Image (cartoon, rainbow, N blue to C red):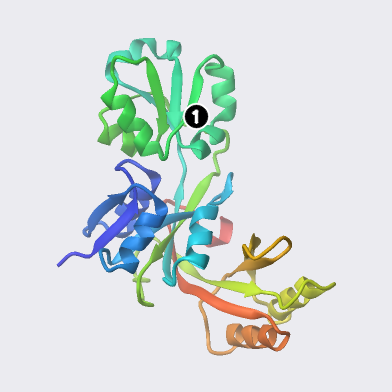
Amino acid sequence: MAAKVGYLGPKGTFTKIAVNELFPRENKIPFDTIPACIDGVMNGELDYAVVPLENAIEGSVNLTIDYLIHESTLPIVGEIVVPIRQHLMVHPTNKDKWKDITSVLSHPHAIAQCHQYLHKNLPNSKLEYVKSTGAAAEYVEEHPEECIAAIGNALAAEEYHLEIVSRDIHDYDNNKTRFVVLNRNVVDLSTNNPLYQGDRTMLMVTLPSDYAGALHQVLSAFAWRKLNLSKIESRPMKTGLGNYFFIIDVEMKKDDVLIPGAIGELESLGCSVKILGSFPVYFVGKETMANK
């Protein structure tokens, strides 16, 4: 029986592209929100969930991080990185008058990623935020009588039978989004997949107290072991002002010596450390971890 994979829907989102690449033959089920998708795995409705974690331009998806920390106990078992190419699309009935569109719909991140294009080419159009790029395309398909446009990917145009009238309208060509794969158990995804580029371990570190040099001591535990960190980010613990935890990405799979040694050193300093996952990383396209 094919595995059930949940993703942030509807069809035509960038999350769906990630799912199509990593789970081409599995049963794909869209969800309206990130929490609902994660809950689907927690309650056994799904085998996997694929949700956005970070965009290169707009930063972390805080809802995903906070839900994984405060509401969920699911381990991260994989990651897939998808290049973000945004297009302007309209209903076919409006393809000859698209420069007169009155509104542009999309996810807030997508609109922000296309700010320069919109400012230059559609300065008088109203910008309307919806929950996803797929939802924007769906609305445009269902309202051909309105002279409106959506910002989304080529899959959305195909799924919702829209006409792309302007391609690659994003401000930055190197934009991409990281999506994480969640499962109830620590499972090993394939490293034989041609998209596989390496491994990553994600840690949550909580300091014992806020004192001078505390973060330096944390980083030193990794530095002298020559463990490469690709990201360190603070998030509020939601217990009061000034209380934070740190998300740290280590660019290697959890081993038996180096990462456990760093964790042991942090714990000896009074830090609390939780492994959120140690997992393979896949890249869509020619991008690699070495030149990301």
From the viewer's perspective, tell me whether residue 209 is left or right of residue 180. right
Q: Position of residue 59 (x, y in %)?
A: 59, 49
Res. 203 in view:
yes
Q: Give SS at disc 1.
A: loop
How many residues crowd around disc 1 within 10 Å: few (fewer than 14), some, or many (20 or more)? some
Q: Position of residue 165 (x, y in %)?
A: 39, 21
Residue at the outermost left position: 1
Residue located 62% across and 65% down the image: 237
The quadrant of the picture occupied by the N terminus is bottom left
Q: Position of residue 123 (x, y in %)?
A: 56, 16
The residue under label 1 is which amino acid type?
Answer: Ile
Disc 1 target residue: 169
Q: Quadrant of residue 85?
A: top left
Res. 194 in view:
no
Residue located 37% across and 25% down the image: 89
From the viewer's perspective, tell me whether residue 171 is left or right of residue 270. left
